[in-house]
């Protein structure tokens, strides 16, 4: 396995090469290209002090949101309450309801032609609340911390400028960060300003039981490093 110092040198070599044509068309092209150029078969790479890091890459200035983690709100019946109150008929015509909405802490989402709910931030938890202050679910501080650290414990995060698209897309890998340690206060600040949002994706099974398709906390990729307490730019 390549050592950490050699890996950093390889990343600097990639930066000096300038734009590299994608090795695969589509969203996953950037990760495939980076791994191929670094000759890495898995996305776990050596870090300083022998710690393993997850290698992630992103296109700079992309508007596509990055999923930080998925976690259903509490209490256990919260999704069912949300679906009952705000759900609408599925387009499949199967007499089932669904609720697909992106919610933030800045504005109420619009459901059924009127304000639905938004994120309310407290000291130790965040809630989903209606304009009249009724809560339809929450996440506590420890749950958020554990969910984040389980999904994104330590990262080597590589950013690239982009030219072209599809099979002609080209990447210039010119910025790398070492990231670890969940920064809850920064996480809350990003929620407050609407940089982090929550995607609600709820449906129903054939028997009518509520199905969470993945309630996801998501962020603009250029802001990911702000979620970490330890940030070191190495390139």
Image (tube, helix red, strand yellow):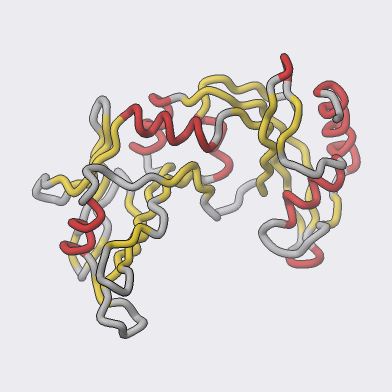
Q: Quadrant of residue 168?
A: bottom right
What residue appears at the point 75 percent right and 32 percent down from the top-left corner?
A: 45
Position of 176 with respect to 208 (left or right) is: right
Quadrant into which the C terminus falls = top right
Residue 200, position in %: x, y?
35, 56
In the depicted structure, whether residue 229 falls above or below residue 116: above
What residue appears at the point 56 percent right and 29 percent down from the top-left corner?
A: 153
Q: Quadrant of residue 79?
A: bottom left
Residue 145, position in %: x, y?
41, 29
In the depicted structure, whether residue 63 falls above or below residue 69: below
Residue farthest to the bottom, as pictured? 93
Using the image as rendered, state which of residue 106 and residue 221 is in the foreground: 221
Position of 201 with respect to 111 (left or right) is: right
Residue farthest to the top, as pictured? 49
Residue 169, position in %: x, y?
78, 60
In the depicted structure, whether residue 51 falls above or below residue 84: above
What residue appears at the point 73 percent right and 47 percent down from the top-left corner?
A: 161
């Amino acid at each position: 396995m390549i050592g950490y110092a050699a890996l950093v040198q390889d990343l600097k070599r990639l930066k000096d090469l300038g734009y590299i044509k994608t090795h695969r068309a589509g969203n996953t092209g950037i990760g495939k290209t980076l791994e191929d150029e670094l000759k890495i078969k898995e996305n776990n790479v050596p870090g300083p002090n022998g710690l393993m890091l997850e290698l992630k890459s992103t296109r700079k200035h992309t508007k596509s949101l990055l999923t930080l983690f998925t976690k259903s709100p509490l209490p256990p019946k919260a999704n069912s309450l949300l679906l009952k109150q705000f759900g609408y008929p599925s387009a499949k015509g199967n007499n089932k309801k669904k609720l697909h909405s992106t919610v933030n802490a800045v504005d109420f989402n619009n459901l059924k032609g009127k304000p639905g709910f938004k994120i309310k931030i407290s000291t130790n938890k965040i809630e989903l609340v209606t304009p009249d202050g009724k809560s339809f679910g929450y996440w506590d501080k420890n749950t958020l911390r554990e969910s984040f650290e389980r999904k994104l414990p330590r990262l080597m995060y590589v950013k690239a400028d982009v030219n072209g698209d599809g099979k002609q897309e080209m990447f210039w890998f010119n910025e790398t960060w070492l990231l670890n340690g969940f920064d809850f206060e920064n996480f809350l600040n990003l929620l407050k300003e609407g940089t982090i949002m929550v995607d609600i994706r709820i449906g129903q099974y054939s028997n009518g039981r509520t199905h969470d398709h993945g309630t996801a906390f998501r962020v603009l990729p250029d802001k990911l490093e702000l979620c970490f307490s330890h940030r070191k730019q190495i390139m």
